[in-house]
Structures are given as C-alpha cells and as structure tokens.
Image: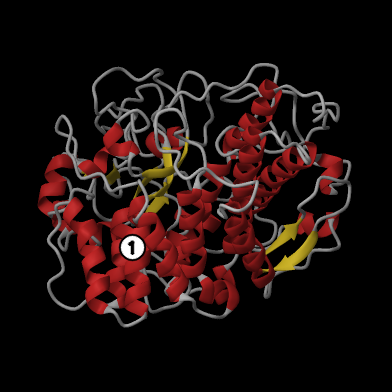
Amino acid sequence: MKLRYIKNLAPVALAAFLGFSSTSCLNDLDQSIVDEQTNTQLDMTSYLAKVYGSLVLTGQQGGAGSADMSQFDEGNSSFYRRIFEANELCSDEIVWTWQGDTGIPELTNISWNAEHGYTELTYYRIMYNVTLCNFYLDTTAGNTNPDVLQNRAEVRFIRALMNYYFIDLYGKAPFKDVYNSNLPVEKSRKEMFDYVVAELKSISDSNNAEQLADYCGDNSNYGRADKAAANLLLARLYLNSEVYTGKANWEEAKTYADKVIASQYKLNTKTLNGYSAYEQIFMGDNGENPNARQEIIFPIRCDGATSRSYGGSVYTVASCTGSGTPDQGLASSQWTCNRARQALIDKFVSDGAKLSNQDIPVKDFCKKAGDDRAMFFVNADRTYSTEEKTTFTAGFGVLKWSNVYAQGGTPSDATFTDTDIPLFRVAEAYLTRAEANFRLGKMDEAKKDINTIRTRANAAPFEQSISEMDILDEWCREFYMEGRRRSDLVRFGMFTSGSYLWDWKGGVYSGAAVNSKYNVYPIPANELSANSNMSQNPNY
C-alpha cells in the first residue's frame, strides 16, 4: 500500500474531552483545527487520514516519537497490536518468548487483573480512536458536500468497529458519540450491540445521505470502508449474538454473510510465481497484487517508507522471525518473540513431535500437512514442545506473514513492512455462513462452505459429517495469527472451560481450566478512578 500521511496534520488528542484527570496519557488538543464553513477539502482529507491512520500509527512522527498516548510505551500502543495481543497471546495459537516482559505472563497464562497494563492500554487506545471519530463527525456536522458525506459514513464505520472491540473484549463500553467535555457513560453489551448494529445498517442504507460506497476494492479506493465491510462486521456481530446479547441470531449472521459473498469481493484462488493463493494475502505487495486484493475487504494499510509503527504488520512479521528463520523481507527487524503453541500445530498434523529438530521449510511443511495454510518452519534447533516457555526455538516457527513481494520487486524498507493487514476478508463470510448453517441444522450447506475454503488451500474436503469442533478448528486453520482467536474460543465455550485445553492455558504446561470471568477483560482500575460512570466486570 502507499498511504501517504498528510503534511501539517494538526496534533490530535483528547485528554480533557475524554474526562481524564490532569495526569491523562493523552496530549492537549488544538481546538482550532477545523471550521467546517471555510475548511478546504484537503483539510477534510487530512483529518480523515488521521482517523484511518489511527488503526496502525501511534503518533505524529512514525516509528516512535511524538506519541498519541505519551504515558504509554508508543511501540505497544498501536490499535492493531493491541487487539492482536488481546486475542492471540492468551489463545491456543502462539506463545510470546520474552516472559519477563511486564504483562506478558498474564496474557500467556490467562491470569490478568484490573491493573494489567496491556488491558489498560488496549482500552485507552480504543477510546482514543472513538474520540478521533467523534471529533471528525462533530466538526463536519452539517456539511453537505457529497464527498464529506461519504467520508462521514466511513468514520462512523470506524467508530462502530472500535465499539465492536469494546463489546467483544470488555463486555461493555464507555459510550460517547459526541465530542465534548462530558465523561463517557457506561452502556451494556446489549445496548452497545444494538447501537453498533443500527449504525452499520444506517450507513449501508442507500436512502441515507451518509452512506458507504458500494465497493472500494479497486486501485483508487482500496483501503476505504465500503458496504461489504459493514455487512461483514454485521455478520460477525450476529454470529456472536448469543455471547453479546444472550440470544442467538444465526439467520441474520447468514444473511449478512450472503451479502458479502454476493459482492464484488472474491476468494483468491490463483497461484503466482510459486506463491499459493492463501500465501499472497499476507505478503508485502498484497495491496498491489490484484489476486490478493480481491479478497481483502477492509485492510489496515501499511507502508515501510511512509507509515511506520511497531504495531502493524511489522509486528506480525518481525515477532516470528530470527534464530535461523528464512528471509521474510524484513532483514533489520527480527524480534524472536512469537512461535506456535503445540495446539496450533495439532490443527494441521497429527505427529508434530516427530517433526522436531528436522529441516522442514515452509513449503515442505505445507505438503506434509496437505494444506497450504500450514505455514510453519522447523530446523535442527526447533522442537514441537513449548515446555521451555522462554526459548524461541521451543515451538515451530510461524511464517504466515511476510514482507516479500509475490509479484517480484524489493520492499521499500528493511525495518518496516509494506504488508497490509487484511482485517476483514472474504473467507470470514464463508466460515460465518458455514457456522450459522451448522447451528441451524443445515449440515450440507455448512460443509459446502467449509470445503470451499479448504479447496482453496488444497486441503482435502470433508467427506463425512462435520462436528462443532471441526468448525472451531477450521476457524483456526484459516485465521490463525490474525487477531481473532480468543473471540472464536469464547463463542464456542472453549476459552476458559476444561473442555478444551492447550499448552500453558491456565499457567500449566498441560493446560488447565480458568475462571469464567476471563471471557471478558476487566475495566482498568485507573478508568474506574477517573470515571465514576463506569463499573467493574464481575469477579474482578
């Protein structure tokens, strides 16, 4: 991607207006940024760029420096890194090597509390991004320029997306939909579910002035939110409706998944220069490669030259490389952090332990697994076992993400990635529809959609009847290390229970059940001190 951050973007931040105390982590706001009566389209675009940029960038400088949230470590404060770690580091997919890092053991073992720093940082990053959206919407209110009306719909989508993560991660939200000095008020999961659903339907309504474009997957509009993005977020919300509201709504999940599958976006099924269709989706030129781009409904755009942070795809590539891993197009960033838990390898092969300490390149591992998605690396130093929790080579390498170009060419930087993050992609609609049909008793339809996904990966289709665990496993095979696993495990009742264990769940190598309170994160203790409108989640 080539996201070029607009010059002279005024500093945005929001302490007093979020109701923080004078010790807030956020900077002061220059309130003279926008006069909607005289503002030029370039200025409008610059603020829109800030809203989109907040999905991955962490400040005004890039990399680090002039942070949005100066009280926290800037490298950790990227929105994508925050939701990724909140959903992945506690799951059955990956384990972080540096267990001495503050806050990491609690994620690894599922043992956090209301003072957990990463939990707090994630909460405030989402809140910060919501307030950016509110600021943009308030300052453009009443503007009837057609471009601004579409921009407003896109910002409303991003605000809805942020509030979705409050619903999913925290089970409630500090709600504000205007930009003022009032404290946010607490709204329940059900209230927020209804609000977000209504917002997404409103900006998808062709009768409304503020509506998303029908399609933004072409060269000129790639990266912008469109109706397919709204429909896929609606499908995700309805798929999780029983968790969020207490009432299942599989029919609506299916309805909105149908809309996505019927859109102009399509699964990539084409190989290119020896790279599988699946592999291309996570490569450095995925935003320029038309094969990959046709599947990516809503990307978080990254560019190693012009939009740098330590929390975008540089995180997903660099955290998995080093100590003998093959070149992933990021020679200057190899962090030796994340590697596969045994439970992840078990989704693809039945004899993981026998593959330890062998030289098995990624392509060969895919062949052994009979699945293009099994993008794991083994060499003479690597073991299947993760019992040595603080050793990077204890656990197979995960090389799903890379900064290499499928079409050929050289990445723009050796430290920061060009790989766009496919936050929403078409495969999710197929698996959403499969799960919804399964819950509705339509087994043949469910199996058909799962087999569509498996066929794309050159994996053998399911011939016999499928089980609930087959579906949960398929979510893992298709979407491992994309920042959603915890949410899927919660929906299936597997995240905290003893029904499904994995290595280091509950802080025990063999795995152990944990308290069901961990199905949501706690409201940070500092937030409770700063905002009397908020209350704590049960048992924290």
Residue lying farthest bottom? 441
Residue located at (33% from left, 44% from top): 295
Q: Quadrant of residue 293?
A: top left
Q: Which quadrant does the C terminus fall into? A: bottom right
Residue located at (41% from left, 18% from top): 413
Residue 118 showing in the rendered view: no
Going by the image, does 410 lie left or right of 60? left
Which residue is under mark 1? 431
Q: Position of residue 530 (x, y in %)?
A: 84, 54
Going by the image, does 350 lie left or right of 9? left
Residue located at (57% from left, 62% from top): 168
Q: Position of residue 299 (x, y in %)?
A: 45, 40
Helix, strand or loop for disc 1: helix
Q: Position of residue 8 (x, y in %)?
A: 70, 17
Q: Position of residue 176 (x, y in %)?
A: 77, 54
Front-most of 408 and 295?
295
Q: How many marks?
A: 1
Look at the picture and state if 47 lies above or below 363.
Answer: above
Residue located at (47% from left, 62% from top): 236
Residue 36 showing in the rendered view: yes
Look at the picture and state if 446 lies above or below 43.
Answer: below
Residue flagged by tag 1: what amino acid is it? Leu
Label 1: few (<14), some (14–19) or many (≥20) C-alpha neighbours in 10 Å: many
Q: How is the image coloured?
A: secondary structure
Look at the picture and state if 105 lies above or below 172.
Answer: above
Q: Quadrant of residue 77?
A: top right
Going by the image, does 453 lie left or right of 484? left
Q: Which quadrant does the N terminus fall into? A: top left
